[in-house]
Amino acid sequence: MGFENGKREKIHFIGVGGIGMSAQAMHEHFTGKEVSGSDPYSSERTQYLRSLGIKVYDKHEETNVEGVDEVVMTPAIPKDNPEYVAAIKNGIKITMRIDHFRRILEPFKGFAVTGTDGKSTTTSMLANSLINLGADPYVFLGALHNKLEHGNYRKGSEETKVVVYELDESQPGFEQFCPDYLIITNIREDHLENYRDLEHYYSCFETLIKNSKFVVTFADEGKYKGHATFGLYSGDFKMVERKQEGFRQIVTIITPWGEKKLFLPVPGYHNALNALAVVTLLSSVGYNIDDVLNSFHDFTLPGRRFNVSYDNPSRKLTIVDDYAHTAEEVEVLLKTAKEVYPDRKVVVIFQPHRYTRLKREAERFSKVLQLADEIYVTEVYGAFESKNGASARKIVESIPKAIFVEQLDELKNLKFEDGAVYMFVGAGDIYNVSQEIIKVLSVQ
């Protein structure tokens, strides 16, 4: 595998440090190809790829693709990128990341997770359960998880040929995948700027459902009915009670096999729903439901999902990092914080992600952020989008006592109170600031 006529195949990834690209690069590396990549942004992933022996260039240059058989890239790479230009000039095969990913998945029995919210957590739950159930899956995850040997990637068994993967719905093209088993966590109108209109957005989900052999959907939403459904108020599998005990929760569910208990070692009703989706899928396709329920016993959340990055018991001072970036995700995060820390002051430091989302959900963000006791809002992390006149000041102006943070460095001047929980929230670079603050607190 990875060889043709005795020659080792060479494949190069432009933007290899991305969470999806790095996993695909690792897969090709472990299946025998000679892999290289480029990324001007140094990150934990680029450093990790280098530790595996993968050549990672920190500049985009024509010479990086000399002797390469195939170049993998995303639509975000501009057409004047020197590596892309060199590949065109030299007749090197160019493949879009999504097409390359589909090609990787072809030989496997695929378990996919998509939807607006909870993809990474649900995917990591599904992977964790299948590992514990003995399926020995390959895994491609849109986050880092300590259950996976390589963080966002796991090399599984060539005998079982099972793969678990997170399927990103933010761009058209995801509907071209053909998973054997599919969980749709929920469908809300996010990333509409990448679609022609709302009808186009929904039609992509409809196509994906048709392409999948067995589909699990969220019954309460009612948009699409899968082969099996889960929910709070309706569905084949229904959550009827939930008891939160610190970080642990006990969930009572109604199933086709009667009432069952799920002991889940992570907090939040949204995570109970994510777990219920996994229980619905696996027990519906032949796994014993009691074995499935027991498979959650050692589950931990992926990185930046209610991640307690700092905890000082003597000061009762806690810092939590979370990737939440839609209004609904922020809402369930803050409600979870209030459940886990019922007697503590909850301070949210929120970095909005994408100007298009801010414009669309500004009013909703203003409402849900007020679940916190103290509110700081930073300027938007644009994620390569243009401003178009949008600013996070709009959120702050509509919230009494909220504070606008124009530059992230200003957060280093925050006075951290004893007895408070500080939530650093967003999908951008706010995580880097919280880690710098933690370094300072740790030596005080």
Image (spheres, grey):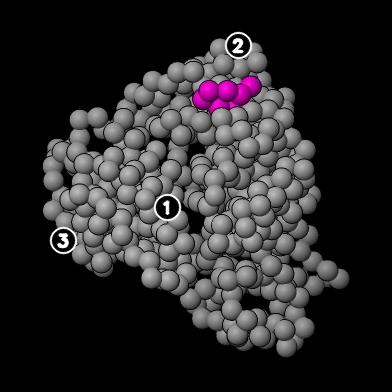
Q: Main secondary structure of the magenta part?
A: loop
Which amino acid type is marked by label 3?
A: Asn
Q: Is residue 308 above or below residue 408?
A: above
- Verify CB contact (< 8 Å) between mark 1 and mark 3: no
User: Which numbered disc, 1 or 3, marks the residue closer to the eye?
Assistant: 1
Residue 361: give its label. Answer: 1
Residue segment shown in magenta: 230-236
Q: Is residue 14 above or below residue 224?
A: below
Which amino acid type is marked by label 2?
A: Gly
In the picture, measured across the screen, residue 322 lies left or right of residue 318, that is right
User: Which numbered disc, 2 or 1, marks the residue closer to the eye?
Assistant: 1
Was residue 42 drawn as part of the magenta stretch in this picture?
no
Q: Residue furthest right?
A: 5
Q: Which residue is mark 2?
A: 258
Q: Quadrant of residue 222?
A: top right
Residue 413: give its label. Answer: 3
